[in-house]
Structure formats: structure tokens, C-alpha cells
Image: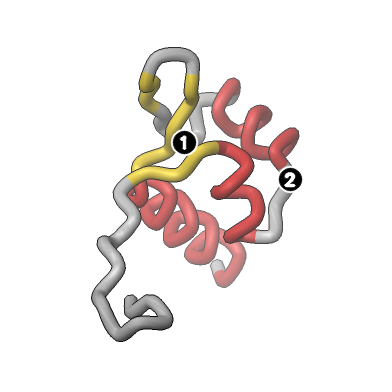
Amino acid sequence: MENGQGAKKPEKLAWALDEAAESTGLSKAYFRKIIAAGEIRTTRAGRRVLILDSDLRAWLDRNRAQAVA
């Protein structure tokens, strides 16, 4: 990813709940629901709940596969 000055922006490794919600079009409440149900893993940094990028992508892939089947 490049920023406006041509420099490469580092790849995102983890998403806060509001960022994950915004990037997927899902609500924060929905993310809280699937977290509580154990459908997606989280990690904490202090008080912040983070979803690793790899876990978010894996969850999206699993759910895409279920929607197609």
C-alpha cells in the first residue's frame, strides 16, 4: 500500500473492533456477538481488544465458504 507521497505504508497486522467493523461493513455489536460466541479469536493490548488480520481473514473465508455451500 502506498501513501500519497509514494512511500509504502506498513501492512496492518491487527484491527480494533471499530476498524474491523468499518473495513467489513459489519457492526461493532456483531463483532462483539461473534467474539462472545468464540467464532473469532481476539487478543488484548492493555484495554484494547484487537483482532489479528490473519484471524479476521480466516473468519471471513470460513463464512464465505458456509454461504456458498
Q: Choose top left, top right, bottom left or bottom right for residue 7.
A: bottom left
Q: Mark 1: which secondary structure? A: loop
The residue under label 2 is which amino acid type?
A: Ser
Q: Is residue 26 above or below residue 8?
A: above
Residue 27 is tagged as 2
The tag earlier along the polypeptide, 1 or 2, is 2
Tell me the quadrant of the picture where the C terminus can be found: bottom right
Residue 49 is tagged as none
- Give how far across and how far down residue 57 sits, in percent: 40, 56
Gap between marks 1 and 2, in whole Å?
A: 15 Å
The residue that appears at 37% across and 21% down in the rendered structure is 45
- What residue did someone put label 1 on? 40
The residue that appears at 34% across and 55% down in the rendered structure is 12
- Give how far across and how far down residue 34 sits, in percent: 60, 33
The reply, left or right, for residue 29 in relation to residue 7 is right
Q: Is residue 43 above or below residue 24?
A: above
Q: Mark 2: which secondary structure? A: loop
Q: Which residue of the protein is positioned furthest toward the front in this rendering? A: 5
